[in-house]
Image (cartoon, rainbow, N blue to C red):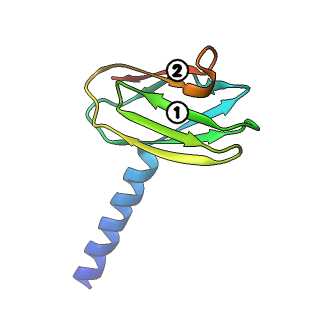
Amino acid sequence: MKKLLLALLATASLTAWAADNNYSLVIREHRFEPAELRVPAGQKIKLVVHNQDSTPEEFESHELNREKVIAPGAKANIFVGPLKPGRYPFYGEFNEKTARGVLIAE
């Protein structure tokens, strides 16, 4: 019984972690929404990026050391962190003039 209780508590903790550290970005009309996303510093996070455009877009950030092509209508999970407090710009490589944003770790 004790082992079962410990297993349930561990699963609940992982589920809570997963829900608390997920952040959503949407690509719509070749723009990121929100363009500014605040996340906790010092923690690993998951960005769920949903491309609602009819063309592919590439999430790219030199500061985060990430790049990922996201097909039209698709979602992508991008894991980053833990991050030091600061600003981490990102952009859509296929639409650099409009698809811009920043992740703010605080």
Identified at 61% across, 27% down, the residue is 94
Instruction: Point out the residue furthest to the right here.
Output: 54
Q: Quadrant of residue 28?
A: top right
- Image quadrant in which the N terminus is located: bottom left
- Label 1, residues with CA under 10 Å away: few <14, some 14-19, many ≥20: many
Q: CA distance from mark 2 to mark 1?
A: 10 Å
Residue 33: x and y in percent read: 62, 26
Q: Earlier in the sequence, mark 2 or mark 1?
A: 1
Count every numbered label the image shows and give the total: 2
- Image quadrant in which the C terminus is located: top left
Q: Amino acid at mark 1?
A: Phe
Labels 2, 1: front one: 1
Q: Secondary structure at mark 2?
A: strand
Residue position marked by numbered label 2 in the rendering? 101
Residue position marked by numbered label 1 in the rendering? 59
Instruction: Point out the residue furthest to the front here.
Output: 94
Instruction: Point out the residue furthest to the bottom here.
Output: 1
Q: Amino acid at mark 2?
A: Gly
Q: Secondary structure at mark 1?
A: strand
Residue 63: x and y in percent read: 34, 24
Q: Is residue 35 left or right of residue 11?
A: right
Identified at 31% across, 67% down, the residue is 9
Indicate which disc residue 72 carries.
Answer: none
Residue 3: x and y in percent read: 23, 81
Q: Is residue 81 above or below residue 35?
A: below
Check contact, mark 2 vs mark 1: CB within 8 A: no
Residue 55: x and y in percent read: 72, 37
Identified at 76% across, 38% down, the residue is 54
Identified at 29% across, 38% down, the residue is 43
Q: Quadrant of residue 79?
A: top left
